[in-house]
Amino acid sequence: MSRSVKLAAAAALGGLLMAIAIASETRSPVVPTTTVLVADEATSPDPHAAELRRCRTITMPESGCDAVWDAERQRFFHGRDGHR
């Protein structure tokens, strides 16, 4: 392949990439049309939700948090042993 053919191919590829870049920059942004609904944690069916949120922030062991986590574990595993 001659040097002029390689140069023409490179120029064509560069032009194509430039056209794609310009087209993507001038395109208007897509606005999402869906609505995201967030559940209210105050009406959560989990009675321990507030205590679990508090316990996530502590770094030292606390018997109250241990009890809440055990109750949550029992609720999640429906009484089965979850430590297998």
Image (tube, rainbow, N blue to C red):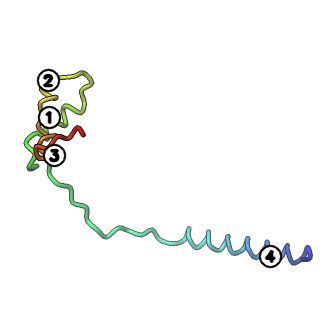
Residue beneath the point at 21% across and 60% down: 37
Residue beneath the point at 18% across and 32% down: 54
Residue ranking furthest to the right: 2
Distance between the Cα atoms at labels 3 and 4? 63 Å
Q: Secondary structure at mark 3?
A: helix
Residue beneath the point at 47% across and 71% down: 28
The residue where tag 2 is placed is: 63
The residue where tag 4 is placed is: 9
The residue where tag 1 is placed is: 70
> Label 2: how many residues lie within 10 Å, few (<14), some (14-19) or many (20+)?
few
Query: Which numbered disc, 4 or 2, marks the residue closer to the eye?
Result: 2
In the visual, does 72 lie left or right of 18?
left
In the visual, does 21 lie left or right of 58?
right
The residue where tag 3 is placed is: 76
- Contact flag, marks 3 and 2 (Cβ < 8 Å): no
Q: Earlier in the sequence, mark 3 or mark 2?
A: 2
> Label 3: how many residues lie within 10 Å, few (<14), some (14-19) or many (20+)?
few
Q: How far across and down, in percent of the image, does residue 47 sit?
A: 7, 42
Q: Earlier in the sequence, mark 4 or mark 1?
A: 4
Query: Which numbered disc, 4 or 1, marks the residue closer to the eye?
Result: 1
